[in-house]
Amino acid sequence: MADSRFEKINDLFINYSQGNFDYKVKPSSKLDEIDAFISSINMLGEELKATTISKNYFNNIFQSVSDIIFIMKKDGEILDLNHAGFALLKYPSEKLGAINLFHLFQNKNELVDFKNQLNKFDLVINMHVKLKDKNGKVFECMISVNKIEDKGKKAAEYQGIIKDMTKEKEAENLVIRTIVDTQEKERERFAKDLHDGLGIPLSGLRSYIDSLTSKTSDEKMLETIAKSKNAINYVVNELRNICFNIMPRTMKQFGLIGAISELHEKIESMWNLKFKISASKDFSISNIPLEIALFRIVQEFVNNAIKHGKAKNIIIKMQQDRKKTIITLKHDGVGFEYNKSREFDGMGLQNVRSRVSSYDGEVEIKSAVNKGTTYQITLPVKTNTE
Ligand SMILES: Nc1ncnc2c1ncn2[C@@H]1O[C@H](COP(=O)(O)OP(=O)(O)OP(=O)(O)O)[C@@H](O)[C@H]1O
Ligand SMILES: [Mg+2]
C-alpha cells in the first residue's frame, strides 16, 4: 500500500505554490527519511514566509513613495516602475516595456550629459533635467541613478529615483520674477525722476539761452550762446539715451516691438550697423514684466554684438503661434567658440538665462568663429497671460 505521507508532501507543495506558507505537515512517529524530508519542507515554508514578508515590505515602500523609482537597463529601457512613476509619466502599467528613460528627456544636451556621467561613473547624483510625460507635458525634476551590483546578472541594471521639482521650480521662478520686477519698477521710477528732475530744467535753460540771441549783436557773445545751446542739446540727448537704457518709455506706449524699434534707431545712428526687425502677424506679449525681460535680453544681445561680435548686421525675428513665442537674435561678425559647458557665460548671459528660465523658457546660443552668433529664445505662450 502506498505511503500516505507522499500525498501530504504533495499537499504541502500545492499550498506553498499558492503562497500559503503556514501550512505544515506533521512528521509521523516513524521518524524515518521521509519524515526528515517533511521536516525540511516545513522549514522551507518558514524561509519562504520570511523572504516574502521582507519582499512585500520593500515592495510597499517602492510603491508608496511619491517619487518615481525605477529599474532600467543601460540602454534606458525601464524594467520596473513604481505607481508614482506610472502616474507621473502618464503611462498605463501594461505599457512598461515601451518606456525608455532616454526618450523622456526634453533637452538633447541634458541627455548627453546624463549618458556621459552614466557611462563614466555608473552613477548620476541629483541632476536637474526636464522630462516629458507620455502626453508631451514637460516637468522639471531631479534624477539620481546608480548601478545595481548583482554578479549573477549578465546585463548591468540600474536603479534610479526621479523627484518631481515642478513646485520647487515654480516657487523659485516666482522669487526670481519678483526680484527682477521690483528692480525694473525701481529703474522706471529712477528714469522718470531723472527725466523730469533734469530734463525739464534743462529745457528751461535752453529757452533762456535762446532768448539771449535777440539781446545782443556781439559776434563773440553770439558764438558763445550757440556753443552753449549745442552743449545743452548734447546733454539733453545723452540724458534721453540714459533714460532710454534704464527704462524705455516707448515700451509702455508701443510695447516690445516699439521699444526694440527705438533701440534700433539709436544704435544705427551711433554705430555702423544695419538692423532688420520682423514680427509675425498679431505678435504680442501681454505680460509687461515679460516684455521688459525680453527687451533686456535684446539689449544684452545688441551690446554683445557690438562689444564682442564686431557685427555689421543684426536680424531680430519675433514669431508666435498658439503655443510658443520664438525670438531669434542673429548677427554676423567674429563669433566665438561657444560650447555647451557655459564656461563663457558672464553676468550678461547668466542674466539672459535666468530671465528666460523664470518664464519656463529655453535659450539656445549658437556661435562659431567668423560665423556670427545666434540666440534663440523659446517661451511657452501661457506665460504671456499669467
Ligand atoms: N555676440 C557675441 N560675439 C562674440 N562673443 C560673444 C558674444 N556674446 C558673448 N560673447 C563672449 O561671451 C562672453 C560672455 O558674455 P556676457 O555677455 O555674459 O559677458 P560680458 O559681455 O563679457 O560682460 P557683461 O556681464 O557686461 O555682459 C563675452 O565676454 C564674450 O567673450
Ligand atoms: Mg554682455
Image (cartoon, rainbow, N blue to C red):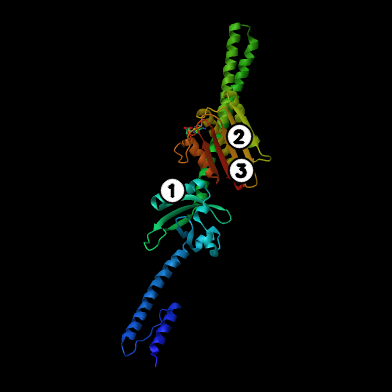
Q: From the top left corner, tell me how far across and down residue 55 is, in percent.
A: 41, 69
Residue 1, above or below 110 = below
- Residue 330 in which image quadrant: top right
Q: Which residue carries the number 3 mark?
A: 325
| Amino acid at circle 2 | Ile
* Label located before the other in sequence (2 or 1): 1
- Residue 189 in which image quadrant: top right
Q: Secondary structure at mark 1?
A: helix
Q: Secondary structure at mark 3?
A: strand
Q: Is residue 229 left or right of residue 123?
A: right
| Amino acid at circle 3 | Thr
Q: Which residue carries the number 1 mark?
A: 116
Q: From the top left corner, tell me how far across and down residue 133 is, in percent.
A: 55, 55
Q: Residue furthest bottom?
A: 1
Q: From the top left corner, tell me how far across and down residue 125 is, in percent.
A: 41, 52
Q: Secondary structure at mark 2?
A: strand
**Which label belongs to residue 316?**
2
How far is mark 2 from mark 1, CA to CA? Answer: 35 Å
User: Is label 1's Cβ within 8 Å of ligand 1?
Assistant: no
How far is mark 3 from mark 1, CA to CA? Answer: 32 Å
- In percent of the image, x 51 and y 44: which residue is there? 176
Residue 333, above or below 145 = above
Which of label 3 and label 1 is nearer to you?
1
Q: Are marks 2 and 1 in contact (CB under 8 Å)?
A: no
Residue 318 seen anywhere in this rendered image of the structure: yes
Which residue is nearer to you in this view: 120 or 131? Answer: 120
| Amino acid at circle 1 | Asn
> Crowdedness of circle 2 by 10 Å Cα count: few (<14), some, many (20+)?
some
